[in-house]
Amino acid sequence: MAKNLLIVESPAKAKTIEAILGKDFEVKSCFGHIRDLEKNDMGIDVNNNFTPKYIVPAEKDRVVKELKALAKKADEVWLASDEDREGESISWHLAEVLNLDPKTTKRIVFHEITKPAIQKAVQNPRIINMDLVNAQQARRVVDRLVGFELSPVLWRKIGRQGGLSAGRVQSVAVKLIVEKEREINAFSATSSFKIEASLAATDLNNRSVNFKAEGQRYTQENDAQQFLESCKGANYTVRDIQVRPGKRTPAAPFTTSTLQQEASRKMGYGVSKTMLLAQRLYESGKITYMRTDSVSLSDTAMDAIKAEINSSYGEKYLQVRKYKNKNESAQEAHEAIRPTYMENHTVNDPELSRLYELIWKRTIASQMSDAEFEKTTAKINISTNNEDLTATGEVLKFDGFLKVYLESTDDEEAEEGESRLPNLTVGQELDFNQMTATEKFTKHAARYTEASLVKKLEELGIGRPSTYAPTISTIIKRNYVEKKDKDAVKRDFRVLELKNDSIKKLIESENTGAEKSKLFPTDLGLVVTDFLSLHFKDVMDYSFTANIEKEFDEIAGGRVKWNNMVKEFYLPFHSGVAHTLETAERAVGERVLGVAEDGKPISARMGRYGPMVQIGSQTDEEKPKFAKLKASQSIETITLEEAMELFKLPLMLGEHEGQEVSVNIGRFGPYVKWGEQFISLPKGEEPTEVELERAIEVIKAKQVEDAPIGFYDGKPITKGKGRFGPFIKWNDLFINIPRAYNFDELTQKDCDELIAKKVEKEANRFIQQWPEEKIAIENGRWGAFIRFGKKMLKLTAGPNGKYTPEELAALDLEEVKKMILIQEPKAFDKKAKAPAKKKAAAKKTPVKKAAKKKK
């Protein structure tokens, strides 16, 4: 048995570090957090100084048991969780659970997993920093208070019981996306005419070289045409030339947010994927810690970078730089994200190599010389006109850091790089090819990508490196935001062309407005944001949220007590929750679109299963008519005409093999109905545009998909693709297909193997089942547990301690129900039925016809 037990967060890291420290250390993983607030209760005693109630989740029992046993045998326990506040918190929870003294237990931190860094950390241990722990604890408590108290308000006032949630950071992030979408919806494009001339000059080799020059823009077509008219028969002469030197400076090394942004721009990665890959690089010792808001580099790293630049590029490419953190509270780590060994230009893993090379190039470039340019601006005189044309060009004189790396931009309006001009001299006469006045349209602001949203949150001071990726994942998972593409639309534009002293008017077309992987608010996101903004102005205020982050920083610095900070936040917040529950009206985001011919209002609003349109109201004698919105439609933008089209559904298309075929939109999207069978339409297809021929194609494709590909135990095997990827189905069992199998060419042998493994796994999964009660005792990764509906609950200890497998198999239902009631006191309460409402006497009211539109 090793004398020392060192505990880290992940098993991958444990393996690497154990190899470095040798036989005197046993390195084990705690698999992240081992304690958390109670799930089924607020988990905070608000009447006792906001004391948190922590529990060890059932799935972590086995890990804790193993660590306790190892800690008892070890001479010394070392805590080596990550170096940020969350990592400090994990170390404290480990100390509490393993009965270690936080004042004496050795705590080590390192921001890279290399032999020198680990050895140095072991030689310089410290104790747990309770200020950092308290800062993380304050964040966790405040976030739980907001979520626990706001979410029930949403259930009561908006609906969708249990499906809605609110959060201190997530709700503000959704608000940013909502405001951007409304800015875009309110935008109205304007056009202007861009003047561009194609000219030619003779170079030193007596060759004609074409280049472009621009004139001023005109807002009216007539003005642009008059300018072109004035240029007929003109001579073009170089009036003036200005040559100015310019330079471009490299960007700082990566922080968490800048890595997420650049990986999105250059490789199209979402923030979660970037962090997952960066975590693997860090745990395998390839890069430094990936959750940081610092741009500084250690002296050791600087020496390695200088050596690499001198060796690979030469001394003239080296320019040592010290970058200053913009964020004054940059304390999550002590260094920017960089490779641990600069001589390693790449890694062998193909999945990790692209991100690693991006980090390597950015780090190297940060210490390289400026790129040097020469920019030329030529003013060109028009003999028949007082206005000049302007031609610009740029020549790269020294590439500097551009030899390695060029930072991308989020600016979708950015023009292409400037071209090189031919050698021009003042007074030189130029040849004229043609001139155009092309209609150009202004563009609305770009929607957020995951990365640009992170950038905005960082600019506002909201969130920290460890929270960006989880925040975005949460708002997408909660269906407040969608990440999707938007197709381009065709648009005509006008062109005036001057050529051979003749002006032509042309109409050309372009595809515009295409967007990829952008964040769009859902109707649910719009309704929830409006409700929270109306009733909880502080929580939804950007400055207020940023100031809370600063208060967490104050706690981390030991300048503020965490309980006091939480109290100052909670008292007015709780009062606002109580007031809203008592006074606020239900919110459905209703928007009146118009009036039907019979005088009934037509509106769009949120319904139980999502956005819908409605004819009539609940107070009418006749039941209102409802229709679900298409995926491409929104409550905020749908028109009356589009709404009326939806009421044509379900749309009868005809018959196929003696059964009726129709299309409609249901709870899970558009579908074809054939007899009693429902078949989802492929993504992007609108039911109102589907004809019988296409519907039959969808039906036949489903028949092929559902046709057995083989048999097992005399029962058919079918295959398909679902939410979690490709699968086969047999005897009501869904079996995911591992990557090792070719889904398109599954053999009978493949199916036999997959089904046999699944059957064996299912047989070992259940110890006991009571299907009618939705209760089971199951084997889990960390031991046996109770499954009650969708919840996973602990097995309480028996009279002799932990139950043996034989004792679990002998437990009766009543004993298991008692265990459930300890954790879920209201588990078996019967819901009282609401008394039936008395029907009000129908009142006859005169029908108001919709007013005719003025012509």
Image (cartoon, rainbow, N blue to C red):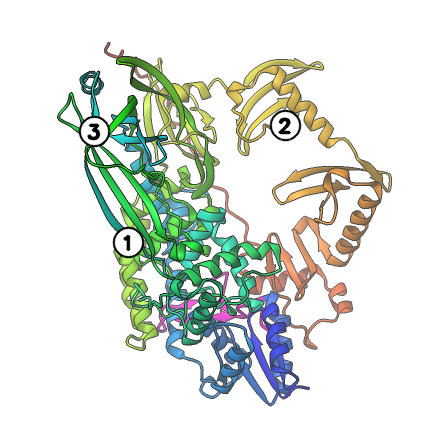
Q: What residue type is disc 2 on? A: Phe
State left or right for residue 767 relative to residue 89. Answer: right
Residue 56 is a magenta residue: yes
Q: Secondary structure at mark 1?
A: helix
**Observer-nearest of 111 and 804:** 111
Q: Which mark is residue 88?
A: none
State left or right for residue 353 relative to residue 380. Answer: right
Q: What residue type is disc 1 on? A: Tyr
Is residue 438 visible to us here?
Answer: no
Q: Residue at x 29, y 59 (%)?
A: 546
Q: Quadrant of residue 42?
A: bottom left
Earlier-in-chain disc, 2 versus 1:
1
Gap between marks 2 and 1 measured at Cα: 46 Å
Q: What residue type is disc 3 on? A: Thr
In the image, residue 37 sits, relative to residue 480, either above or below, namely below
Q: Which mark is residue 678?
A: 2
Q: Secondary structure at mark 2?
A: strand
Earlier-in-chain disc, 3 versus 1:
3
Question: Residue under circle 1?
Answer: 542
Q: Which residues are magenta?
A: 29-57
Q: Position of residue 193 (x, y in %)?
A: 25, 24
Residue 166 is a magenta residue: no
Q: Single out the mark in the foreground, 2 or 1.
A: 1
In the image, residue 423 sits, relative to residue 151, either above or below, namely above
Q: Position of residue 432 (x, y in %)?
A: 28, 23
Gap between marks 2 and 3 measured at Cα: 73 Å
Earlier-in-chain disc, 2 versus 3:
3
Kindly check if marks 2 and 3 are in contact, taking CB atoms under 8 A apart as contact.
no
Is residue 337 visible to us here?
Answer: yes
